[in-house]
Amino acid sequence: MASLFWLGFILLGFFLFGGLPQEGNAGVPMHGPGAWRLQSWASFTIEEMAMKKAWILALLGLIWSGASQAGAVRYDIDGQSFEGYYLAAGPKAPLVLLVHDWDGLTDYEVKRAEMLAALGYSVFAVDLYGVGVRPTAMEEKKKLTGALYQDRPRMRKLLAGALAEAGKLGGRLDNTVALGYCFGGAAVLELARSGADLKGVVSVHGGLETPAGQDYKQTKASLLIQHGSADQAVSLGQFAGLISELESAGIKHEAISYGGAPHAFSVFGSENYRADADAKSWQRFTEFLGEVTKG
């Protein structure tokens, strides 16, 4: 987004002080015939002045959006500090609440956020661990996710707090889809069961089991479940079990299993990455976004 800022800055300078590379412009020649020339504001017609004013206002908006509506965002929940990542695509853009895998908010989530922003969606990638907590050892990942799996009210509070923060940043809470990968996929299903007012919930190779005592009776969102049929962490039995639950609860849903795809099939650069399954899941996901966020 820094490049967006500097592009806007350079273009603003051109429209403030520049002219077209043609002969006859008023001002001082720079490097001979046909070179760029500085043009006096007094030489512009009223129509040209109006056009430049419109361009300047638009470019100031570009600079402002690039400078202040992208990047790391710190926020607090119950006295603990968290650091999410926000990208704004405009005041009318639908919002995607992106929930990370068990290694915390990393470059992977940032990349997915950038991909979504390029499609016209604002994105808030949440942090469920806290500022600076980005585990690399498997035992630490298990400990952090295990703590939230064992404290579902805490998980819900963190998700709801992140959603509220996205609203404060300008995200459209009336037109939001929650997306989660792996651990994040389980987390967004928790958010769905909480009755959060969402347009859609998407779980990509996420945990699918419903905790004892919970159900989908309060769910308001449409669900998209994307699963790898070769997933050794989440079984096809669990996949089928969730479909049965959603059907019984009357929840609008779509569940897709990608043949030969293992757990974490969409994680770029990992040994489990499967480009074909990732491409298909991303295509269906973006189609789903367009369907549920219309209007």
Image (tube, rainbow, N blue to C red):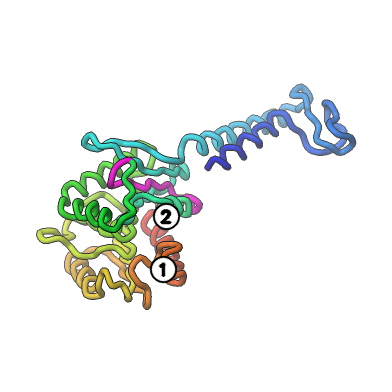
Q: Secondary structure at mark 2?
A: helix
Residue 121 located within the stretch drawn in magenta: yes
Nearer to the camera, 2 or 34: 2
Magenta residues? 117-131
From the image, tell me which residue sits under label 2: 108
From the image, tell me which residue sits under label 1: 271
Give amino acid for label 1: Glu
Residue 257 position in % (x across, y down): 33, 73
- The prevailing secondary structure element of the residues shown in magenta is loop
Q: Is residue 220 left or right of residue 226?
A: left
Residue 245 position in % (x across, y down): 18, 68
Residue 282 position in % (x across, y down): 43, 63
Give amino acid for label 2: Tyr
Label 1 or label 2, whichever comes before in sequence order? 2
Up/down of 89 relative to 146, above or below: above
Question: Residue sitting at 89 percent across and 34 percent down?
Answer: 32
User: Can residue 169 be seen by looking at this rendering?
Assistant: yes
Residue 270 located within the stretch drawn in magenta: no
Nearer to the camera, 163 or 294: 163
Q: Secondary structure at mark 1?
A: loop
Question: Residue sitting at 17 percent across and 64 percent down?
Answer: 249
Contact between marks 1 and 2 (CB within 8 A): the answer is: no
